[in-house]
Amino acid sequence: MKNIKKLFEEVKPDFFYKRRPYRLYRKDLGSGRFYYEFIGDEVRHYCSITNVCDKLLPKGIEFYKWVMKNGGEAETIRDAAAAYGTAYHTCCAMKIKQGGFDFDWLSRITKGKTNFENMLGDYAHMAPRWIEGFKKGLTCFFQFLEEKVTDIYAIELPIRSHLGYAATLDMVCELTFGGKSVVAAVDFKSMILEPGSTKKKEFHDGHEFQLEGQKFAWNENFSELPITHVFNFAPTNFKGDVPTYELKNQTQNKFSRDIITQHGPINLFVMKMLEAKAMGYLNKPSSKFSFIQGKFEGNFDASKHIIQYQL
């Protein structure tokens, strides 16, 4: 079992206010992203909340308009935005862990490339075009921390639920909202800021579903510190020298309400997850993994080095 773990990425939080009660591992498969928990010889699987959302909720008309508009470039645009978003999340976490941030570090050279280029991976060539907007977007997040956040409990924390899904929470914190202090999950939504653009981040049902799932799983795991509010955060292409941002309150979202059934009231998010289970969306993926180990001298016998494992 120890060797099997090598095939998976352990998802470690950037920060958590106490000792983790368990460890989760992650694997991207053809059927989507899954999380795994290893307990002795038992392997428990959890479907990513994003994976569930993609299968369960229909795409809006705007999504299909966007695909038609961009055609064959849609996948490249999506992947580029994902690389940008990963870099943005990384820098946000750096500020929280280190207590500050060096904007000039992004342009310093490491192994022949700037640190920003290294973070972008296959899209390093976009760094000169993106760098100033990227830094501007970071100032929005840092301003948000200064104005709203009073305490932080978790950054990039993976958690799982008995409903059969797992999620990674961007941030759980205490922040000031409506004149009082609340415990909240905040999901970061980055946006590529282009000079002169007035475009704002759009939020949709999937964002509400994911946040409600994050709140449900956190409260199931850490009932001593319940999340009461959920928000989406996004930078804005502000003018002037005072950064602004959008903090979308998603607490009273459509999935947070109860609906009446013949068996009594049931939370809509829970009902959706039961629907996902009935549809087979939470089923264990039937993937076979292989890994190579050991050393040899002389003749090579593949059977002694290539190990296959069926989860």
Image: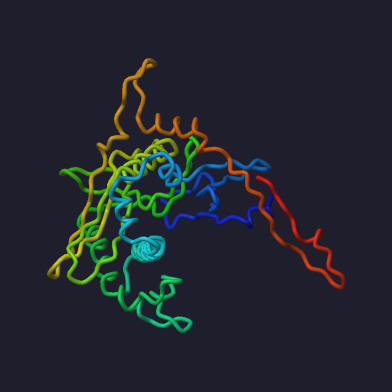
Q: Is residue 11 left or right of residue 207?
A: right
Q: Quick one: quadrant of the C terminus?
A: top right
- Tell which of 272 and 68 is nearer to you: 68
Q: Is residue 100 left or right of residue 272?
A: left
Q: Residue 122 in the image: x percent, y percent?
A: 45, 71
- Residue 164 vertical position relative to residue 265 in the rendered view, above or below: below
- Residue 91 vertical position relative to residue 148 in the rendered view, above or below: below
Q: Is residue 309 left or right of residue 194?
A: right
Q: Residue furthest right?
A: 298
Q: Quadrant of residue 189?
A: bottom left
- Tell which of 284 and 119 is nearer to you: 284
Q: Residue furthest left?
A: 240
Give the number of marks.
0
Q: Residue furthest top?
A: 262
Q: Residue 149 in the image: x percent, y percent?
A: 25, 53
Q: Residue 299 in the image: x percent, y percent?
A: 87, 70
Tell me if I can see residue 94 in this picture: no
Q: Residue 251 in the image: x percent, y percent?
A: 26, 39
- Tell which of 63 and 276 is nearer to you: 63
- Residue at left 42%, top 47%? 50
Q: Quadrant of residue 222?
A: top left
- Residue 50 vertical position relative to residue 237 in the rendered view, above or below: above
- Residue at left 25%, top 36%? 252
- Residue at left 56%, top 46%? 36
Tell me if I can see residue 248 in this picture: yes
Q: According to the image, what is the colour scheme of the structure?
A: rainbow
